[in-house]
Image (cartoon, helix red, strand yellow):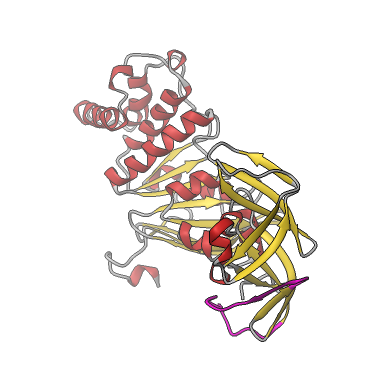
Amino acid sequence: MLDSQSPDTRPSVAIRDLDLRFGDVEVLQKLNLDIKQGEFLVLLGSSGCGKSTLLNCIAGLLDVSDGQIFIGGKNVTWAEPSERGIGMVFQSYALYPQMTVEGNLSFGLRNARMPKDEIARRVARAAEILQIEPLLKRKPGALSGGQRQRVAIGRALVRDVDVFLFDEPLSNLDAKLRADLRVELKRLHRQLDNTMIYVTHDQVEAMTLADRIAIMKGGRIMQLSSPDEIYNRPQNLYVAGFIGSPAMNFLAGRLDGGVFTSGALHMPMEGYEFARPPAGGIAVMGIRPEHILTGAEAEAAPVRASVTVDLVESLGSDTLVYTELAGGQLRIRMDGLAQVRPGDTLTAGFDPARASLFDTATDERL
């Protein structure tokens, strides 16, 4: 039982067999999740996967159909949001327009009848951490989008809790502000060392912020691991295709005797770490565009194939080359200064150790 664990080993947030149903529709299904103390966990997935719903269950904004939620070792499944020891930052800033920044930060504390000197201390600390001290006397209408989001984060920060919940807090900002605030959130987590649970559909946010990522689909967690593990060793075809921009290349073929064959491509899988002993049969090989070698590196690669360039996209720092191999499209990411044109013939080099193999019957990693 969770309550019998020592405080040192107890997870900060624990979810046990969580179900959520709206009528006959199952939104979350027998979901189990342990989040460590001080961990930055990102819930990642496309719209409708259940990530925001799960966050709202943790926050107490939705009543669960079955299962239990523990925060700090305490069963809070039916506790009010105010009793859960959490601070929440929403997608919309949800600031009171008639109040100053200082008023917005202190509003919840004043309602809780906290002593004035303690309110002042917490507001000053949050303003210093978020670098919004010069803005305390302004109203939200006089702030930029990034400044408003800092105030929204500050309103959660003044609660002085152990767990912070973020529901797509950067989605309303432009690209540059999102990048700037990502850095600030990472720095904030390192400074506070609080548990943070963050919902997003943005891969870049997930990969750059998370200690671990939970990729969700249909109310289930498809993979829970570090960003590096998810990127380099996806557990199933869904995760492999979801993570990465441009997406992973997939080639359909067969695996026999440790050799993957797709059309004219024959790849002995030497150096590949099989998740389980290969039985052989129909399989799919995935390889990321940046893991396909060209030029001198391709000539030294264990496996090589000749491909013809169909289309070239210049992305500044990178050049994305579209070719065809074994009847399927093959994307190759090259250096931004690469001199390549449609119609050119390239040697593409493959390292089996950088590939991923999947069982077509189960979609699971081989």
- Residue at x 41%, y 55% (from the top left corner): 211
Q: From the viewer's side, name the closer residue of 49 and 29.
A: 49
Q: From the viewer's side, name the closer residue of 179 and 345.
A: 345
Residue 149 % position (x, y): 44, 29
Residue 266 % position (x, y): 69, 75
Residue 263 in the magenta stretch? The answer is yes
- Residue at x 70%, y 62% (from the top left corner): 306
Q: From the viewer's side, name the closer residue of 184 and 275.
A: 275
- Residue at x 49%, y 27% (from the top left corner): 94
Answer with left or right where residue 131 lies relative to residue 303: left
As drawn, 23 above or below 81: below
Residue 307 % position (x, y): 72, 58
Residue 240 % position (x, y): 62, 60
As drawn, 235 above or below 280: above
Image quadrant where one finds the C terminus: bottom right
Q: Which residues are magenta?
A: 262-280
Please, which residue is most extreme toward the left here? 117
Q: Is residue 62 visible?
A: no
Answer with left or right where residue 33 lies relative to residue 242: left
Q: Is residue 169 visible?
A: yes
- Residue at x 33%, y 33% (from the top left corner): 112
